[in-house]
Image (cartoon, grey):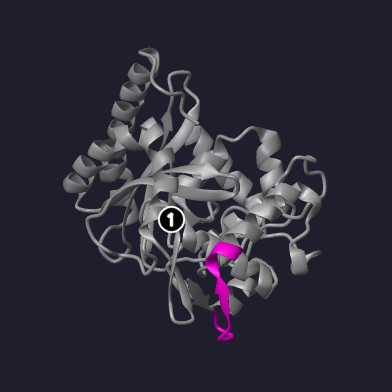
Amino acid sequence: MNVGDDSGSGVSTRRAVNDAAAEVDRGADGALGDAAGAPSAPDAAGAAGAAWGGRRGGDSGTAGRRTDFVQSLDRGLAVIRCFSSEHPSLTLSEVAERTGLTRAAARRFLLTLQELGYVGSSGRQFSLRPRVLALGYAYLSSFSVSQIAQPHLEDLAEQLHESCSVSVLDGDDLVYVARASANRIMTIALTVGTRLPPYPTSMGRILLAHLPERELDAYLHRTTMRKLTEHTITDPDELRKVLDEARTKGWASVDQELEAGVRSIACPIRDSSRKVVAAINASAHAARVPMRTLEKQFLPRLQEAARQIDSELAARMSTGGRKVL
């Protein structure tokens, strides 16, 4: 079976599979056949992070990596990550550009992923197939916070008539692991798996506020904070003060810092040792819900939902459930 690329040439899928397998056998020497010396792939957030102005420095490249690091696997995963809601289908040239691979290397990875059922093609366009969902489902099915939180989120969204979510930190990204939508108030499509920068979000600030001081210092040092709206805090010292306040109060609110017209409020979710492992929030349209309403009416219900999740999480862990994170 031959699969065309955007240059019009055909390449044997079976040969592509064999080529990619050979690359894995070569391990971390960085060789990619005719792509030797190609730059390393983007980091874990891939294209989703690119929508927010690129990735932070310091978490890409090969310096300091273990000798058993398999660069071919890193690059293959980068090909999967380069697709996004903004770019659901890409040509071979676009995949090569977004991953930093040569066209030859990108072609081999795409054809290997197609053979395995993770990528499909139509003409010169490649896109992800539903089988990719299995990669994330393995995490979600073993992450008890998302399972426990979902029914509570649905009850809370029904009470407030607003969308509610639960998120965790994954590296320098805020990742949604559970969500109940009441209304679509944002231009951003928020679903389970969505990645956002944590600094302009209420859940992100809760999670950042409870990082060990050393980790927070490192995050603030390596992160370039973009002004997403006129209200976005981008000064590290000012953000640190806001995080200190959130840690003291036990909750955080954001007024149109991620997106104009959207407000949100969040509080922490804790495991049985009282460690903050996730955050829960409610968001609303600024024209409809004043900040005072968020604090006086939304927050108590949000905190009660968090307490219920905390209790169920502690009970599950005490009876031998999987450890959170």
**Which residue is pictured at 41% across the width and 68% down the height?**
260
Label 1 Cα neighbours within 10 Å, binned few <14 / some 14-19 / many ≥20: some
Left or right of 213, for residue 82 = left
Residue 251 is a magenta residue: no
Residue 9 % position (x, y): 58, 83
**Which residue is pictured at 37% across the width and 51% down the height?**
192
For this rendering, which residue is in front, 181 or 291?
A: 181
Left or right of 157, for residue 51 = right
Residue 1 % position (x, y): 47, 71
Residue 319 % position (x, y): 35, 13
**Which residue is pictured at 43% across the width and 19% down the height?**
272
Determine which quarter of the picture holds residue 187. Answer: bottom left
Residue 8 is a magenta residue: yes
**Three-letter residue code for mark 1:** Thr
Query: Among all residues in the image, which is located at the extreme bottom?
Result: 8
**Which residue is pictured at 28% across the width and 40% down the height?**
150
Residue 40 % position (x, y): 73, 60
For this rendering, which residue is in front, 313 or 246?
A: 313
Left or right of 319, for residue 212 = right
Determine which quarter of the picture holds residue 117. Answer: bottom left
Question: How many marks are shown on the rendered structure?
Answer: 1
Placement of 148 over or under 9, stated as above or below = above
Placement of 107 over or under 166, stated as above or below = below
Residue 232 visible, this angle: no
Query: Among all residues in the image, which is located at the extreme left?
Result: 158
Judging from the image, what secondary structure is the residue with disc 1 in?
A: loop
Residue 240 visible, this angle: yes
Quickly name the residue at label 1.
Answer: 194
Placement of 58 over or under 260, stated as above or below = above
The segment highlighted magenta reads 5-15
Query: Among all residues in the image, which is located at the extreme top?
Result: 319
